[in-house]
Image (spheres, grey):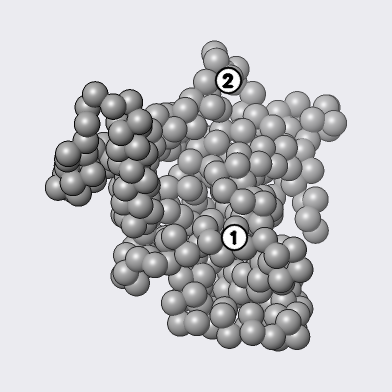
Amino acid sequence: MNNKPIKNPFWYVFGPLFVYWIVGICVSIGTACVLVIGNVDEFAKVISGIDTGSADAMTMAMQQCSLLAMKLELKYALEIQCVKAICSIFACSVFYFKDRKREKEENAQMPEKATWSKYIFLLVFAVAYNIGVSCLSYMVQLVSGNSSFQNTSAIFYNSKFWLQIVGLSILVPIMEELLFRGIIYKRMRTKTPFLRAAMFSAILFSFMHSNAIQMVNALVLGLVLAYVYDKYGSFKAPVFTHMIANLTAVIGTNTGIFNGFAKSPEILGVTVVICTFVAAVMFTMIQRMDTGLKPEQPSDKSDDSQKPNLDMFR
C-alpha cells in the first residue's frame, strides 16, 4: 500500500469523474447540434407558419421542437453513447497511463499476472452471471409490474446489431473499466484496503445506471470486477469480464433467448438457479487461483494492524 501523501486527495479521486462528466456534457451538446443541423428541415416544418406575435403559438412550437429533439435523441441513443465512450476513453487514458507511469517511477511492486488459460473462468462466469441477472430482472418485472429495465434496454437494443456489438460490448466496457476500476478503484486501492476501495468505486459505478435493477446489478458487478482486477493482476481481466457480460446480453436479446425464458416463470426460476450455481463455482475457482491478489506486507513490520485483509472473500 502506497503511503506517499497526496496533495489534493479529493481531486485525486474525483477529478477523473468530473472530467468524464464534462466530456459527456460536451458530447451531448455537440451531438444535439449535429442532430438539429442534420434534421433542420423537420424543425423548419414545425416552426413554419407560426404567428410570432402569439405567445401560445410560440409555446406550442417550442414544445413540438422539444419532442422532435427527444425523438431524435432516442433514435440515435446508441450512436451518441458510442461517441461519448470514445471521447471518454481518450480522456480517461490520460489519467490511466499517468498513474502507470508514476508506479514505474516509484518502483511499485507489480502483482503477478494470471495466465490466459485462467481467463476461461472469467468467460464462463460472465456468461452465467449475465444470463442469471437478466432472468432475475424479468422475474422482478413480473412480480412488481415495473418495466423500466426493459424499456431502458430497448432504447439501445433497437439499433443495428453490429453497432450494439461495437458500442455495448467493446466501447462501453472499456470506458467504464478505465474510469471506475483502472483509475478510481486503483487510486483508492493504493491508499485504502481492498473492500473500501472496491465498495467506493462500485457505488459510483452503480449511480451511472438509470433504474433500480441496473443499479443493484452494477453494484454487485462492480465489486466482482474490482476483485478480479486484483486477483488476475491485470486491467485486462475486468475489461474482458465486462465485455463478455455485455456481449452475452446483446446476443441473448437479439436472438430472442431472453424473451423465450420470460415466457415461463418456471423456466426463469430454473435458469436463475443454474446460472447462480455455475457463477458461484467459477468464482470459487477464481478465488483458489494461486496468483494476483495476495496479502501485502506492511511497511512497518511491527505494526501488523495496518495490514489489510485481502482474503475476505475466501
Q: Which residue is mark 2?
A: 10
Residue at 76% across / 68% down in the picture? 143
Relative to residue 113, is residue 58 depicted above or below? above
Relative to residue 65, is residue 98 depicted above or below? above
Relative to residue 52, is residue 189 depicted above or below? below
For the N terminus, the image quarter is top right
Answer with the quarter of the image where residue 58 lies.
top left
* Residue 220 can be seen in this image: yes
Q: Which residue is mark 1?
A: 149
**Where in the figure is residue 135, as x and y percent of width and height?**
66, 74
Q: Earlier in the sequence, mark 2 or mark 1?
A: 2
**Where in the figure is residue 293, as x and y percent of width and height?**
66, 52
Answer with the quarter of the image where residue 31 lies.
top left
Residue at 67% across / 37% down in the picture? 200
Residue 3: image tag: none
Residue at 42% across / 48% down in the picture? 175
Front residue of 280/88: it is 88
**Where in the figure is residue 70, as x and y percent of width and height?**
37, 47
For the C terminus, the image quarter is bottom right
Residue type for callout 2: Phe
Residue at 55% across / 15% down in the picture? 8
Q: Residues within 10 Å of mark 2 (few under 14, many from 20)?
A: few
